[in-house]
Image (spheres, rainbow, N blue to C red):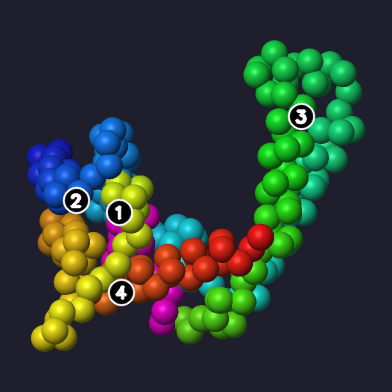
Amino acid sequence: MTTQEQAVKRAAVTAALQKLPLLPDVENTIALAVEEILLWTRSREVENRFLNLGRSGVDKELAVISRLADAMSAAIANAHQPTHATLSDLGVNRSDIFDFCSRISAACRTANTSALPIKVPRRKTAGVPQAVAISLAHYFQLLTGKPAAISTFEDGKAGGRFLRLVEEVFEALPVDASAESCAREAVRRKRVQRKMANNSF
């Protein structure tokens, strides 16, 4: 892709995001959103953070993260004075590390994953189009203060600001997939994430 083509896509995605009812002082967030979305025009590999996973898989990942956080706490506790002094000179405080690691470990141990499906069919894992829609759902909430949602009108047709955003971005990149299907799946996943967060504590 040429630099000019990249610039055209960047401008189109930026314009689509700027049509939203934005919160104040979100220019930097818009820039971050645009760069993340444009990554999909340069790479066709989908990061794990965009891929779906069943409950048992999520539980295993949370357990690993919890163990690593506990291991970090233990490593800091067993470190000698010169190590602590070196970290302190770099602006890393012992107490901050303990607090950070304990919060991560506690969150992983108490996370309620019951809202997740036990298994996820292979066909429902995310491809590039779904990853784009999930990114847009994430930034939609950051930029507007409201969760991404899809409206259904009296005639049965879908609409709303989030769906319109996905449609415009898919057209700009372009993405060869149903904007509505990807937007609906992104909204569903975000809803599950919010339910998990609310049930965790």
Mark pair 4, 1: CA separation: 14 Å
Q: How far is the residue under mark 2 from the one under mark 1?
A: 8 Å
> What amino acid type should be assigned to the residue bearing mark 1?
Phe
Q: Give the side of residue 150 with respect to residue 75, left or right.
A: left
In this rendering, position of residue 115 left or right of residue 42? right
Mark 2 — residue? 20
Using a 10 Å C-alpha cutoff, classify the residue at mark 3 as few (fewer than 14 neighbours), some (14 to 19) or many (20 or more): few
Q: Which residue is more in the foreground, 58 or 123?
A: 58
Q: Would you name the residue on which mark 4 appears? A: 184
Identify the mark nearer the N-term, 2 or 3.
Answer: 2
Camera-nearest residue between 150 and 10: 150
Q: In terms of sequence position, does the residue under pointer 4 or pointer 1 come before the other? A: 1
Q: Secondary structure at mark 4?
A: helix
On residue 95, which mark appears?
3
Give above or below for 15 relative to 162. above
> Disc 4 to disc 3, how far (Cα)?
43 Å
Q: Position of residue 159 (x, y in %)?
A: 17, 71
Verify CB contact (< 8 Å) between mark 2 and mark 1: yes
Query: What is the spatial separation of the Cα atoms under label 2 and label 4, in whole angstroms?
Result: 18 Å
